[in-house]
Image (cartoon, grey):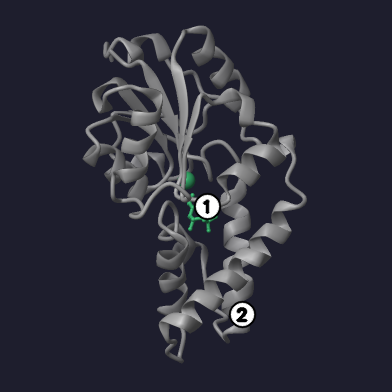
């Protein structure tokens, strides 16, 4: 029986994945990389800031020391935070509020499991904060997805066992992490068919039989 739902943030609840792409592209161009693409960006989804930087640097001619990499990651984050200034509740993805309200009515515990260290800021700017019982994010973890740590911490905070949790994800790294945590998975987003999740939907606006998922009846 599922007693709690743990949501990834970027690309599942909020359209911030687009802003990550813009900020990385700005950095890439400054480094002389003009061919940083959406396909490259797809490999950054769910993984940590430093792992995302490595995806950009695969296309760089120069090599960088660890200290320089920290500075580059910081520079990208400053661009990202600047873009977040314009974030409002209009950036919450379709069906999110309705889904969170429904799950609350069903008596489920609701959490966040995101690699992003900007999670508290994003939740505040979009007005989503109050919908969640617990938040596990980049600030809580030492290992990023595909490691299960972020979801295991979320389950612990929700006082649930992994088997009582369902994870909603849009990234491959996130689905691998959720499975490694022994949790059920619902895949959403443009790549949802490729994720190999237990359940799938293009967006949370699609009809999803939550009662059947909760009872493990699908
Ligand atoms: C994930 C994103 O949610 O957070 C990744 O999908 C991102 O693309 C990661 O790299 C870390 O985010 P931040 O905000 O801590 O740089
Ligand atoms: Mg995501």
Which x, y percent locates residue 207? 49, 18
**Residue 13 can be seen in this image:** yes
In the depicted structure, whether residue 23 falls above or below residue 86: below
User: Which quadrant, please, contains the C terminus?
Assistant: top left
Q: Which mark is residue 29?
A: 2
Q: Would the CB of label 1 be found within 8 Å of ligand 1?
A: yes
Between the C-alphas of marks 1 and 2, the distance is 24 Å
Examine the image and state in which quarter residue 52 appears.
Answer: bottom left
Q: Which residue is mark 1?
A: 117
Between label 1 and label 2, give the one nearer the viewer: 1
Q: Is residue 141 left or right of residue 148?
A: right
At a point 47% along the width and 78% down the height, the residue shown is 69
**Residue 91 can be seen in this image:** no
Which x, y percent locates residue 11? 53, 44
In the depicted structure, whether residue 105 falls above or below residue 63: above
Asked whether 212 or 53 is in front, the reply is 53
Which x, y percent locates residue 106? 47, 7
At a point 52% along the width and 31% down the height, the residue shown is 203
Q: Residues within 10 Å of mark 1 (few under 14, many from 20)?
A: some
At a point 50% along the width and 83% down the height, the residue shown is 68
At a point 40% along the width and 40% down the height, the residue shown is 192
Secondary structure state at the residue bearing disc 2: helix
Q: Is residue 74 left or right of residue 142?
A: right
Q: Which mark is residue 26?
A: none
Asked whether 39 or 171 is in front, the reply is 171
């Amino acid at each position: 029986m599922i007693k709690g739902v743990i949501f990834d943030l970027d690309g599942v609840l909020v359209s911030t994945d687009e802003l990550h792409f813009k900020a990385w592209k700005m950095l890439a161009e400054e480094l002389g990389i003009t061919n940083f693409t959406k396909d490259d960006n797809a490999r950054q989804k769910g993984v940590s800031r430093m792992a995302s930087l490595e995806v950009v640097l695969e296309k760089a001619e120069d090599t960088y020391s660890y200290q320089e990499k920290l500075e580059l990651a910081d520079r990208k984050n400053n661009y990202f935070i600047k873009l977040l200034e314009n974030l409002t509740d209009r950036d919450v993805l379709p069906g999110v509020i309705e889904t969170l309200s429904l799950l609350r009515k069903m008596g489920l515990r609701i959490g966040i499991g995101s690699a992003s260290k900007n999670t508290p800021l994003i939740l505040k700017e979009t007005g989503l904060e109050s919908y969640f019982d617990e938040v596990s994010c980049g600030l809580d973890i030492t290992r990023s997805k595909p490691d299960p740590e972020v979801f295991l911490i979320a389950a612990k905070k929700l006082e649930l066992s992994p088997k009582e949790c369902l994870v909603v994800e849009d990234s491959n790294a996130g689905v691998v992490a959720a499975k490694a945590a022994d949790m059920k998975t619902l895949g959403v987003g443009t790549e949802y068919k490729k994720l190999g999740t237990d359940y799938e939907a293009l967006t949370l606006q699609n009809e999803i039989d939550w009662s059947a998922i909760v009872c493990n009846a699908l």
